[in-house]
Image: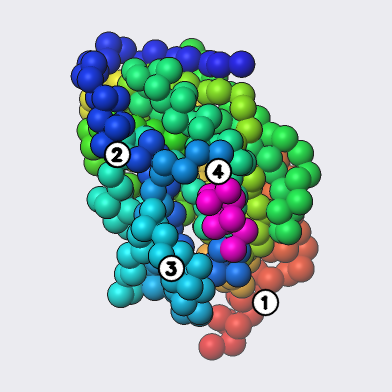
Amino acid sequence: MVCLRKSGDCLWQENIFDLFVLMPSCSIVIAEYNNGKYFTELYDSIVGQSISDFEVVLVDDFSTDDTVALIKEKILHDNRFKIIQHTSNKGAGAAFKKALEHASSEVILMLGADDALHKDGIKIISEAHRQYPEASLINFSLYYCDENLKVISESNFHKEPSDGEYFYWTTKGIDTFKKSKYLETGGFDEKLKSAVDQDICFKLEETGDTIHIDKVVYYYRANPKGISQSNNMFAAKINYCISVFNTYTRRKNSGFKNISANKLREITCEYYYYKAFNYDRKGQYLKSFGWLLNGYLQSKLYQVNLSEEMKKEIGYSMHHIMHQNRISKCVKKIIKK
């Protein structure tokens, strides 16, 4: 199944894919940080591809363990791999941006440092970009796996935007894009530590057609230490909301199709709640209560319909903040001082 969405007229150089004879069919870009223990599985999935015409640009974001040594040992003598090392930790946005500066192919594949590729992944991706030269962004389905990369389910999270809510909402799947289209955007946001894939998808959506192809090309690992999972989940959702705010402002100025004011209010309320949850997890209960109250008042004021998932998370946070009397403890400490 293929879903194609037009964003407007799209100029394309007819001979752009003639350049494929001079460049790799695909550039795989990876932002690495302390994920060395997963690199063998990642490496094996890449070199085991059904086609070998690719390159890998890996940026290590100042890992604090033996990740770089493990990677260098593995990629030794394979000139398809490039490794670039940051001299300080700059975050995923900066790492991916640096990788794109060194990528030579027209087709770009963002690959998680703890994930893996299906053996026909690069073949399917490169053929899709040849088939749809007008597409700036092509998204594929994935296998959702446990921490040991054992397949749990096949996942297709693609969702077409409804009228008046025009945003590229796919947050799971494997996103691939054309470098020429990427260069029309501001590139990866170096201020974002997570949600960088969603942010760049919003930008790419504004440069050409977006397509979803329901073929699995990717193994997604449920890694508790991932930048958008477990303990990092709420921080990632906050960054996602920031990306939405930036996109809304950019599109409001450019006139590109945008989300409605009601949807923006809903995401704003979610942002307040995520801030509350994040502070609660850090043990900063007074700040957590303040953000939770702000979200509650905003949702009541604008009569925002929150999702069932959000309602459950609010209930969980309320239990931590109110039922365990953590706010009252903070207030008592302040009074005593």
Asked if residue 67 is among those painted magenta in the image, a careful observer would answer no
121 over 253 or under it: above or below? below
170 over 229 or under it: above or below? above
Which circle marks residue 329 in the picture?
A: 1
- Disc 4 target residue: 49
Residue under the image location 50 percent in, 79 percent down: 66
Q: Overall secondary structure of the magenta stretch?
A: helix
The figure's colour scheme reads rainbow
Where disc 3 sits, the SS reads loop
The span shown in magenta is 40-48
Where disc 4 sits, the SS reads loop
Q: Earlier in the sequence, mark 1 or mark 4?
A: 4
- Disc 2 target residue: 23
Q: Earlier in the sequence, mark 3 or mark 2?
A: 2
Q: Are marks 3 and 2 in contact (CB under 8 Å)?
A: no
117 over 113 or under it: above or below? above
Residue under the image location 60 percent in, 69 percent down: 37
Q: Earlier in the sequence, mark 4 or mark 3?
A: 4
Q: Position of residue 291 (x, y in %)?
A: 53, 55
**How far apart are the alpha carbons under marks 2 and 4?**
17 Å
Amino acid tagged 3: Leu
Q: Earlier in the sequence, mark 1 or mark 2?
A: 2
**How far apart are the alpha carbons under marks 3 and 2?**
21 Å
Q: Is residue 127 left or right of residue 89?
A: right
Q: Are marks 4 and 3 in contact (CB under 8 Å)?
A: no
